[in-house]
Amino acid sequence: MTKCGDMTGPVTMQSVAKAAGVSPMTVSNTFKYPERVQEETRRRVREVAAELGYIPNHAAGNLASGQSRVIGAVIPSIKNSSFYKYVRGMQDAAAEDGYELVLKLADTKRHETAAIRTFIGLRVAGLTLVGKEHEDQAVDLLRKTGVPVVETWVHGDPLDMAVGYSSAAATRAMVDHLVAVGCRRIGFVGYAGDVAGRYTERLPAFEQRMSEHGLAPDLCHLADEADGFGAGPKALEALCRMDMSIDALLCPTDIVAAGVLFECGRRGWKVPERLAVAGWGDYEIASEISPQLTTVQPNAYEMGRGAIEMVIARASGLEPEDSVRNTGFEVVARASTDNAGSDAA
Amino acid sequence: MTKCGDMTGPVTMQSVAKAAGVSPMTVSNTFKYPERVQEETRRRVREVAAELGYIPNHAAGNLASGQSRVIGAVIPSIKNSSFYKYVRGMQDAAAEDGYELVLKLADTKRHETAAIRTFIGLRVAGLTLVGKEHEDQAVDLLRKTGVPVVETWVHGDPLDMAVGYSSAAATRAMVDHLVAVGCRRIGFVGYAGDVAGRYTERLPAFEQRMSEHGLAPDLCHLADEADGFGAGPKALEALCRMDMSIDALLCPTDIVAAGVLFECGRRGWKVPERLAVAGWGDYEIASEISPQLTTVQPNAYEMGRGAIEMVIARASGLEPEDSVRNTGFEVVARASTDNAGSDAA
DNA sequence: TTTCCGGGTTCCACGGAAACG
DNA sequence: CCGTTTCCGTGGAACCCGGAA
């Protein structure tokens, strides 16, 4: 503060050492192994470091030790709140073990590969991905470098490790719920531009379960992920053109479901009497919109925590006993499907 | 693929060089200055590098060159879509100039400081922050290290550089709009837990402009940012307790405004006849909800682009001629305020 | 192509102080 | 009492990988 620090160039360990009247080694120890340095010395070094605004150069440390306290997370989107709790979980778990979480957005698989490249270039301690579908190139890279990597929001068959829940099981549970409340002509909305492959299991699961209930799984529509809310009206229109007697809609996200609710409002359709609507993800809007949305609650916070715990375990050298972790899900029944078929059945 | 690569240890420039039968320098040049290397050699090096899964060690490069191609962005939240376009703009601008954008979430000022610390530790080329309020410690650090830093979503008075729009001007424009459509008892909703300081300018601007219109700026309520949609109903209730004749509501975000619309639906209030509602941010929901929301559109994409352009300009050594850039805003008038006072006035 | 260098870490050597025979 | 061992805080040298000359 007193004198212009710009003249001295970048603040390095050496400069701190000189200013504190100790050797560079002592500065290093002060930060990395405080117990090795006498309290008085340590205090002085810390003080000088703070005054100079010294921050250890992570790049140099990484290079010298071959270790890193940074974990990279690749996220498909921040367009809606779907990943909010997930990221919170990752942040919290990382912070507890003294790791840093940095994010990169990747809305296509090509960008995902680029993000993985960047993180590996940074020599992060490990990374988390969303979904199980990746470019061959990315898989190859991950295999060859051997970075700890966790695939999230999926269950089973991991590249390295995985944490999440079964979308197929959740789809079946949701079909069961809709059938239980009296729906028969149930429509399915999926995503066409399937960025992360988190949706691919759902359609087959839907078709199978519908058949097991003796119902026809013919009302299916693929929406465009980029449409957001707008996908709802489009899907509803497409499915109505197939069969006006449709009485329920299973949507890929709460956003699409909300779009459907808005459209029902415009059409004057009562929900759930005319059409039961189910979402997915338990976003905040699900419990705020009228009527409240029935949805799949995926335990995103726990998933995020689990992912980071697994990465750290592997980065620390100890093999985590479970390379696949199931964080489960829950069908949250709300007004949008409540007794849907009560007067129609 | 053919043989187990784990035996060879980490893949380095040397190992690639040896495998390709060239010197390490040639490998370096192949990636950094491809034109300096003959095509045939370059091709072979690239091939070997790909086969070995070699990725240049950014830490080493950073250390050797003192430069970085990574820019850090601190984002307050991904709870809703407010920063989606902003981040897209940053990503696109960074990619165009061969930079990488990495994100860190910081929902409090303390976390913001920690994030800044991490990024400086990584020796990023520069960083972007949201808002103009930071901990003293953070300001001190930024000053001392001299990293290029852009404050965004604000206008004027920067630490180093700034890009955004004037919330005060937008507030005045929105008040003018509400008055123009016939509203007189206009309520204001702000945020109490003001994380990034992006909201502080609004209340004074509201009070002043209302007075200039000869209207009483007495209907003000501070909501909790953590409440999301739920803040809408709470705010409406609080303001109605002050004065039931309230005829318009200016909300801090489209989320809060949507919450108000949901509540109006529950109360059977017509929007905008009984209550005109204005949001802020032009989130996707604003144009999807019924009625569509009047809102402030902040040119977030351009703001993101501008931020990165400024960071890169400074990181490249050339002083950007404008250290403060105004990306403006627009009041988007939609049904939620359309002719609000037409039958009431 | 060679050489050196960047900033920090690992490993080990050094030297003073206290404890012991 | 003095020499020796032990302990512990500190400092020195080699090295991590890639870039510049």
Image: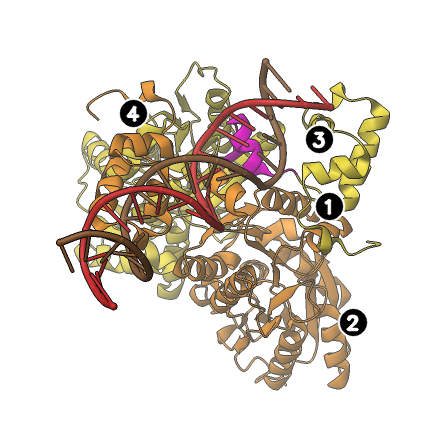
Chain colours: A orange, B yellow, C red, D brown
Kind of residue at disc 1: Gly
Q: Is B197 located above or below residue A127 in the figure? A: above
Depth check, mark 1 against mark 3: the one in front is 3
| Disc 2 residue crowd, few under 14, some 14–19, many 20+, Cα 10 Å | some
> What kind of element bears circle 4?
loop
Q: Is B245 located above or below residue B117 in the figure? A: below
Instruction: Reply yes or no: does residue B214 show up in magenta.
Output: no
> What kind of element bears circle 2?
loop
Q: To which residue does mark 2 refer?
A: A218
Depth check, mark 3 against mark 2: the one in front is 3
Identify the mark nearer the N-term, 1 or 3. Answer: 3
Instruction: Give yes or no for contact between labels 4 and 3 (Cβ–Cβ under 8 Å).
Output: no
Q: Which residues are magenta?
A: B56-71
Q: To which residue does mark 3 refer?
A: B24
Q: To which residue does mark 4 refer?
A: B157
Depth check, mark 4 against mark 1: the one in front is 1
Q: Chain of mark 1?
A: B
> What kind of element bears circle 1?
loop
Callouts 3 and 2 in the same chain: no
Q: Can residue B249 be seen?
A: no
| Disc 3 residue crowd, few under 14, some 14–19, many 20+, Cα 10 Å | some
Kind of residue at disc 2: Asp
x and y, in percent, of residue B122 in the image? 47, 39
x and y, in percent, of residue D2 in the image? 20, 52
Q: To which residue does mark 1 refer?
A: B53
Tell me where residue A110 sits by quadrant. top right
Callouts 2 and 1 in the same chain: no
Q: Chain of mark 3?
A: B
Residue B160 versus residue B171: which sits nearer the camera? B160
Tell me where residue B172 sits by quadrant. top left
Q: Chain of mark 2?
A: A
